[in-house]
Image (tube, grey):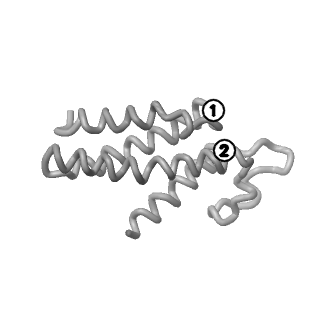
Amino acid sequence: MGAFDSVIQSAAERLLEDEVLRSNLTDDEANVLINWAIEWLEGRVAKSRDEAAARQAAQIEIGRLRPALQEINRRLAAGETPDAGMSLGLPSSSAAPTASPDRKALIHSLIAQKVEAWSEK
């Protein structure tokens, strides 16, 4: 158990309770997204020097994660597919025109983009 588990749990519960973050996803897809968000949150909060700093870090990360999760949810609702997402670094042959798109691959790619962008800051 980490020093700031209660802070992390409280922040994670706020994400889990927000249906808007996963309304267009299957349960498996939502799990991928939420698990990443909680891992990200844990990694940032764990670096805090005390509980007050942990709470502040959790607030900052929730403020960053919520719009990112909403964006990914919206992009999937709009029918974005790996083929439509060439800028995501996925090969155009990743889904045949008649095959259903691999939405989990798209979610992982969108997550990777967020991590890369946030790591550059």
Residue behind mark 1: 26
Instruction: Please tell me which residue lies in front, 52 or 47.
Output: 52
Q: Amino acid at mark 2?
A: Arg
Q: Residue 35: give x, y in percent of width and height.
A: 44, 38
Residue depicted at x 52% and y 39%: 32
Decide if residue 12 is on the left or right side of residue 48.
right
Which quadrant of the figure has residue 13?
A: top left
Q: Residue 45: give x, y in percent of width and height.
A: 26, 47
Decide if residue 44 is on the left or right side of residue 109.
left
Task: Indicate which disc, 1 or 2, sits on the residue closer to the N terminus.
Answer: 1
SS label for mark 1: loop
Quadrant of image for the N terminus = top left
Residue behind mark 2: 103
Distance (Cα) linking label 1 and label 2: 10 Å
SS label for mark 2: helix
Q: Amino acid at mark 1?
A: Thr
**Above or below, comparing residue 100 to residue 80 in the picture:** above
Instruction: Please tell me which residue lies in front, 90 or 25.
Output: 25
Q: Residue 9: give x, y in percent of width and height.
A: 31, 33
Residue depicted at x 42% and y 54%: 64
Q: Residue 50: give x, y in percent of width and height.
A: 13, 47
Label 2, residues with CA under 10 Å away: few <14, some 14-19, many ≥20: some
Residue depicted at x 42% and y 62%: 118
Check if mark 1's residue and mark 2's residue have beta carbons within 8 Å: yes
Which quadrant of the figure has residue 23?
A: top right
Q: Which residue lies most toward the left here?
A: 50
Q: Which residue lies most toward the right here?
A: 98
Decide if residue 75 is on the left or right side of residue 61.
right
Quadrant of image for the C terminus = bottom left
